[in-house]
Amino acid sequence: MDAVEARELVERCLPRFASAGLPPLTAQSIAEVKAKSIASLWAGMGSVFRLSITCHDHPPLSIIAKRVELPAVCDSIGDQRKKDSYDVEGAFYSRGHAEQLIAAGAVVPFPLHVEPRRGSGVTICMTEVEGHSSLPGAYRAFLSWLAKLHATYWGARADEACNPTGRHGGLQRQGCYWHLDTRPEEHQRMSSGGWMGRLKLAARAIDARLKQDPMQSVCHGDAKGANIVYATGRAGEVVPLVYDFQYCGKAAVAKDLAYFFNVEAGHDDEAALLAHYHTTLAKLLIAQGDTPPSLDALNTALELALCDWRRFCEIGLGGWGDAAANRRVQKVLDRLDGGEALATEEAYMEAMRAAFPV
């Protein structure tokens, strides 16, 4: 992106500056705009740029432009998944979802401008979030953020948010990037022996049970440290600033939790962190007239969601292992099959209905 193009892009963002809390600049007040690539997108599908703005009468500032270059034709499940994810992120910023979360106290980048690109692609301009990779109390703070996200889209609100043609829709019909329907190749490559073979046979039953789980909302879908920075609020509180909404969509809320605990928070104080999330979520749901789930129900869904996550990452992440998490998976499998593989996927469906009824 050259300087001329960068300046033109900034000028198209200017009408939203005041709403975003940025100085209300005019085109005439801008002296120079420089673009610097700060990240490449998956599969070479574009870049993230920092647009540094030098002004005549204001201190310098910067915004972020995510420029997505999509293939005209996707010839693999993976490429189609990535293409769809960028369409979803464009919808997240252009259809009011970011503003809705900010209003709920869940801080995300404020959208400044979203435009389709010639051919196939999108450019998303947003405010830059700055902070630390971690602060004391970061995990609890992020789980409060997740509770705000999940409460905002609880129940039927998630279906509205995922309507592809709705004014305030456009999010993933199935949130989270590892869901079974989009990962058939990884599922097929799972070993057929041992506990992994049992999980392979049980995968569709676990997926179906999570789709039926009563605790449905919009999940972030990639809730890890690489997509979060932390700042300190006015009262000294830890404030998570969260970005990357490509896989944001409807799912059982436990999927965000299982992913975050296994990928980011490890096993340190998981019970206390889950209780904190549950207390925060319950208060938010009661305040908006919804019935909160029990902690027991959330715990059950979390174990199933962990099985779903491990089903993907043991293969999809190159065999990345976690012995403690895998022992938890085996306990769930034991409840389904008593420690010996059942004959068919259908048999696991029946066992799931008996052991983990909705």
Image: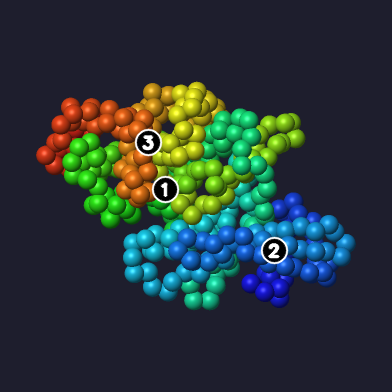
Residue 301 sits in which quadrant?
A: top left
Q: Earlier in the sequence, mark 3 or mark 1?
A: 1
Residue 176: give its label. 1
Which structural element holds mark 2?
strand
Which structural element holds mark 3?
loop
Which residue is found at the position 69% from the left and 70% from the top? 6
In the picture of the structure, the residue carrying the numbered disc 2 is 51
* Distance from Cα at disc 3 to Cα at disc 1: 20 Å
- Contact between labelled residues 1 and 3, with CB atoms less than 8 Å apart: no
Residue type of the residue flagged with mark 2:
Leu
Q: Position of residue 96 (x, y in %)?
A: 58, 53
Residue type of the residue flagged with mark 1:
Cys
| View extreme (right): residue | 57
Q: Earlier in the sequence, mark 1 or mark 2?
A: 2
* Distance from Cα at disc 3 to Cα at disc 2: 40 Å
Q: Position of residue 47 (x, y in %)?
A: 56, 64
Which residue is found at the position 38% from the left and 63% from the top? 80
Residue 322: give its label. 3
Which circle, 1 or 2, is nearer the viewer?
2
Q: Position of residue 111 (x, y in %)?
A: 63, 56
Q: Position of residue 30 (x, y in %)?
A: 81, 67
> Would you say 75 lies left or right of 277 here?
left
Colouring scheme applied when the structure was drawn: rainbow
- Contact between labelled residues 2 and 1, with CB atoms less than 8 Å apart: no
> Would you say 103 lies left or right of 179 here?
right
Instruction: Specify whether residue 211 is in view.
Output: no
